[in-house]
Image (tube, rainbow, N blue to C red):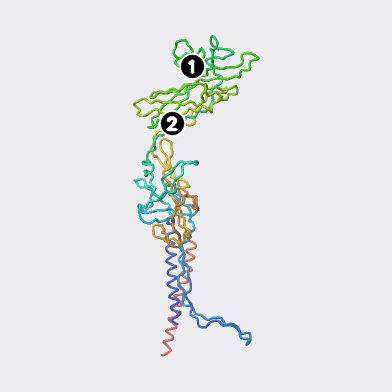
């Protein structure tokens, strides 16, 4: 009789534990990154009243099954359900959720054990640290190099607490340093209908005929006013056909507003029906150094064929990629620098001139304005000079058995001997780790409908075990009444 009471007691205790688990799940139905738990039961070893016996073919006696009385039940396991919760959009740039496997790596300061979490409700403190709601640092990498596919973070370096404002590799990241201009690329059209200032070899527009070496000299070319043709047009008195503004920068970030001036120079072609001279047109260019610099090596010729395409074969006389040397004025505090002026993409058609700079690789210094986080965990800073620079990359931890992690509060887990050791962090989207979804949070994976169902089942189990207890008590009471 006492065995039934002890069995019911074990049932009451186990169902109470299960109800505690269900209550905790429901309490955390709106907790960011919470993982629900599940309690399962197992029976306790049974008392054997008689063992099984095998049938006897000789006597014809049949076999018997064992007779056992169970001694109750116990909690078998309380498992963590690691299924992904629903995603809620928040639009906050520091809110992150993980699509796939992995955990964010956090730690209080620079010492102690790492903890792991799926809750990505991070913030930026006043020193630029990426932290959890409880002030723990989020870890990743901040050292990177430029490779074939752009910048690549050095994931072999030890993990560091991510800081958006400064680090030991790049120093102050609130300001991006200036970059000196090394190349300026032009593209567009030069109007073929412009009249050449040097005339043509078949029908000159000015008196006389071009002297020897007419490409480089003609009667309209007189820079110094001595009446002798020089190697360029009289740029002081002859307006250019087209002017292209070019802004370049020195190592300090000083801006130089240059002007590329272009004159249609000279057209050469056949002078008679039997002449096989190809029709070619030269243009003369000069780079004006602006108000705070002078330009050296900043003049020359380019040449087009009769189809309007740039001729690149005669680089000795027609340099379409000149090296321009800029000598800043002394007050700028900068030394001279040079850049390549690339005119390879120019054309000459009977259309309006439209030459412009399509790329200048230099830029002035800039101040950090905002940042964004990509699916690969890279935090990219956006500066007021229009440039972008990586500020860090968030790392993820993966485990062989995530369900073996131990809850330590604050939506965080600690590794155990059964979860697998955390040794090497993974980049989001690589080595089995999921990708990040910025501007979202992973909510609790608690299914309320399932929890309410489990609660009803648990309540009925608790009630049934309590009935066993009261019934056993009544039987014992009747047994004691037999003496009366």
The quadrant of the image that shows the C terminus is bottom left
- Report the disc number at residue 181: 2
Q: Residues within 10 Å of mark 2 (few under 14, many from 20)?
A: many
- Judging depth in this view, the residue of 211 and 102 nearest the camera is 211
- Front-most of residues 378 and 123: 378
Q: Residue 371: x, y in percent?
A: 42, 42
- The vertical placement of 54 against 338, above or below, is below
Q: Which residue extends farthest right?
A: 274
Q: Quadrant of residue 406?
A: bottom left
Which of the labelled discs sits on residue 17, or is there none? none
Q: Position of residue 391 (x, y in %)?
A: 41, 43
Disc 1/disc 2 C-alpha distance (Å): 28 Å
Q: Is residue 288 positioned above or below 118 on the image? A: above
Q: Residue at x 40, y 36 (%)?
A: 384
Question: 21 or 217: nearer the eye?
Answer: 217
Which SS class for mark 1?
loop
| Residue placed most toward the observer, 90 or 52 | 52
**Where residue 21 sits in the image (x, y, percent)?**
43, 65
Q: Residue 483: x percent and y percent?
A: 41, 90
Q: Residue furthest bottom?
A: 484
The crowd level at tag 1 (other Cα within 10 Å; few <14, some 14-19, many 20+) is some
Q: Nearer the viewer, mark 1 or mark 2?
A: 1
Element type at mark 2? loop
**Quarter of the figure with the N terminus:** bottom left
| Contact check, label 1 and label 2, Cβ < 8 Å | no
Q: Is residue 175 above or below residue 223?
A: below
The total number of labels drawn is 2
Q: Quadrant of residue 168?
A: top left
Give the labeled residue for mark 1. Answer: 231
Q: Residue at x 42, y 59 (%)?
A: 415
Q: Earlier in the sequence, mark 1 or mark 2?
A: 2
């Amino acid at each position: 009789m006492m065995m039934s009471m002890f069995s019911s007691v074990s049932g009451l205790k186990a169902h109470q534990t299960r109800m505690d688990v269900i209550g905790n799940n429901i309490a955390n139905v709106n907790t960011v990154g919470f993982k629900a738990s599940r309690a399962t039961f197992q029976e306790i070893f049974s008392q054997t009243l008689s063992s099984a016996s095998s049938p006897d073919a000789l006597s014809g006696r049949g076999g018997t099954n064992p007779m056992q009385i169970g001694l109750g039940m116990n909690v078998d396991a309380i498992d963590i359900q690691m299924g992904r919760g629903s995603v809620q959009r928040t639009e906050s740039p520091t809110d992150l959720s993980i699509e796939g496997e992995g955990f964010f790596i956090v730690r209080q300061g620079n010492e102690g054990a790492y903890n792991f979490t799926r809750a990505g409700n991070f913030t930026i403190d006043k020193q630029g640290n990426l932290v959890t709601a409880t002030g723990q640092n989020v870890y990743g990498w901040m050292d990177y190099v430029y490779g074939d596919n752009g910048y690549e973070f050095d994931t072999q370096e030890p993990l560091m607490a991510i800081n958006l404002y400064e680090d030991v590799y790049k120093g102050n990241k609130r300001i991006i340093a200036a970059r000196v201009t090394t190349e300026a690329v032009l593209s567009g059209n030069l109007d073929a209908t412009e009249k050449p200032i040097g005339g043509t070899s078949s029908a000159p527009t000015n008196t006389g005929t071009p002297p020897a070496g007419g490409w480089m000299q003609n009667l309209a070319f007189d820079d110094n006013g001595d009446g002798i043709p020089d190697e360029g047009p009289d740029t002081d008195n002859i307006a250019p056909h087209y002017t292209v503004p070019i802004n370049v920068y020195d190592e300090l970030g000083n801006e130089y507003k240059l002007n590329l001036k272009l004159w249609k120079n000279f057209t050469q072609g056949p002078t008679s029906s039997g002449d096989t001279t190809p029709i070619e047109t030269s243009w003369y260019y000069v780079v004006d150094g602006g108000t705070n610099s002078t330009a050296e090596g900043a003049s020359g010729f380019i040449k087009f064929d009769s189809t309007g395409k740039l001729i690149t074969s005669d680089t000795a006389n027609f340099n379409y990629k000149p090296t321009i040397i800029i000598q800043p004025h002394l007050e700028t505090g900068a030394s001279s620098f040079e850049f390549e002026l690339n005119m390879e993409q120019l054309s000459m058609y009977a259309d309006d001139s439209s030459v412009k700079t399509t790329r200048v690789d230099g830029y002035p210094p800039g101040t950090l304005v905002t940042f964004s986080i990509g699916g690969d965990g890279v935090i990219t800073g956006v500066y007021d000079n229009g440039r972008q620079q990586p500020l860090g990359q968030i790392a993820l931890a993966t485990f062989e058995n995530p369900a073996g992690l131990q809850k330590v509060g604050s939506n965080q887990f600690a590794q155990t001997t059964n979860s697998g050791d955390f040794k090497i962090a993974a980049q989001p989207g690589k080595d089995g780790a999921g990708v990040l979804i910025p501007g979202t949070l992973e909510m609790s994976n608690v299914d309320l409908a399932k929890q309410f169902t489990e609660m009803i089942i648990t309540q009925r189990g608790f009630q049934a075990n309590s009935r066993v207890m009261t019934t056993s008590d009544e039987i014992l009471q009747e047994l004691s009444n037999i003496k009366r």
